[in-house]
Structure formats: structure tokens, C-alpha cells
Image (tube, grey):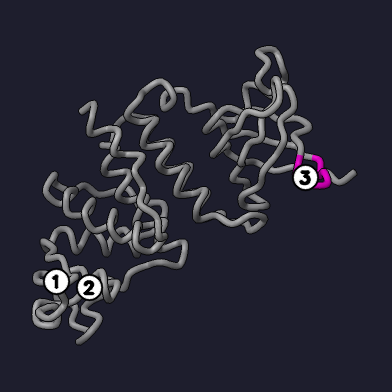
Amino acid sequence: MAFLKTKGIIIKEVNTGEADKVVTIFTESKGKISAYARGARRPKNSLTASTQFLCYSDFVFFSGKEMYSINSCRLIEHFYNLRNDIIRLTYSAYFAEIINDVVQENEPAMSLLKLFLNSLYLLAAGKHDPRFIARVFEMRLLVLSGYSPDVRGCMACSGTDLDNVSFSFESCGFLCSNCSQTDKSSYKLSPAAARAIQYIAFSDSDSLFGFRVSESVLNELEHVFGRYLSERLEKKYTTLDFLKTIT
């Protein structure tokens, strides 16, 4: 019987049988995998604590004919602060949904895992606006997943002045004021928003969240990243729409 030992975080859970679960786990060594958690819905089962949504754990799996089964697990981080706050839980669910769509089965994606975990830790700490964390997460995920827009400068003339640029959804990147005149998909950016987009795209991962933006810039980023993400991944994400009904 083949065993696999790796760290991972639960990004989806589906109840099955009387007390079992099938969980989707974003792991260090195998990317996304599905695993059977026998008895995980029983309160006193040894798997219960570590197989909840967003739990980050050390897992030992054994390989079955159709999927992995969890043999044992040790909880590393439970993220209770997220699961006990409806707003932060909703953002976490949004992140997990996108991760589930982007990460491939049995293909390691350590940079994405680090981004996901760092975003959750910041959400749980409660010191950053969840909207800010979401915008950074969206853009950086696109970069790491191969969907990065070209934001080095104007895609048409190679100009690098960020004081008068638009984001072209058709061309997937920046266009200067002259080159964007005939682009009906372009969205005019403030200089601060353009620089924020550049920063998220190119900064070191350790300083990724180390900047601040105004409310107006945050609104610009939300418009650009929300539409661009939806178009690139060919899916309309509605998880965050729930927050409009309670805030």
C-alpha cells in the first residue's frame, strides 16, 4: 500500500454516507487532490478536527483505486477567526473557490499555496481591509497562474509613463492615452492605481501586501481585477455578492 505524507489545506468538503466526507485538499507536494475521510463527521473521530473547511494540517494518505484516503492528520492551523466571522469567511470561501478552479490535480503549485495561506493569515489577523487583501490575491494569482496582464508599460508603443494609462481588457494590459483612443474596452486608471497594479505584479512575495491604497484606488482595482479574472477564467464569481446584502 502506497502512502503519501504532505501538508495541505482543505478547500472543499462534501458529505457522503452516514458520517464520511470527501475533501478537496490543496497540498504542498501534489497540488490539488481529493481524499476520502472516513468517519470525519463524527464528533470524536480522529479526523474531525483536521478535515474542516480551511484547516491546514499534516496529512498521511494511502492511495486507493479511485482516490486517496486519509490515514491520519495533525492540525497545524484551524483559522477559527475566519470561520467565526461571516465577512472574512465569505472572502476565504471566495479565495478557495478560485484556488479550486486554478490549481490542477497532482501538479504542485507552491507559490499559489503560499499566496493562499498568507492571504488567509492576513484575513484572520484582522489588521487589513478584506477588500485590499482580495485585490492583491486576485492579481497575484493571475500572475502566478499564467494569466498576467502586460503592465510593464503601454503594450502598443512601449511607453512607461503611468500618469495617463488605461487598462485594456481586449489587449490584456496597459495602453497609454494615445494608444487607447480606439480601444472601446479600455478603462482609465489613476496613476496610483496603475502603480499599485505594477507593484502587485512584480513585487517580492515577502513584501506583497506591504503597501496601502485609498478607497478610490481600491474601487478601481476591484473593477479591473474582478472583470479581468472573470474573463480569463471564463467564470462569473458571485460569492462576494452576498456581502452587499449585509454591509
Mark 3 crowdedness (10 Å alpha carbons): few <14, some 14-19, many ≥20: some
Give the amino acid type for the residue marked by disc 3 in the picture: Leu
Residue corresponding to mark 2: 174
State left or right for residue 109 relative to residue 225: right
Residue at image x 49%, y 49%? 99
Mark 1 / mark 2, whichever is N-terminal: 1
Q: Quick check: 176 above or below 206? A: below
Indicate the secondary structure of the residue bearing disc 1.
Answer: strand
Q: CA distance from mark 1 to mark 2?
A: 6 Å
Residue corresponding to mark 1: 165
Q: Is residue 192 magenta?
A: no
Q: Quick check: 183 above or below 246? A: below
Q: CA distance from mark 3 to mark 2?
A: 44 Å
Q: The C terminus lies in which quarter of the figure?
A: top left
Residue at image x 64%, y 58%? 107
Specify the segment rendered in magenta.
Answer: 62-68
Give the amino acid type for the residue marked by disc 1 in the picture: Val
Percent x, y of residue 216: 11, 48
Name the one closer to the observer, 105 or 74.
Answer: 105
Name the one closer to the observer, 137 or 238.
Answer: 238
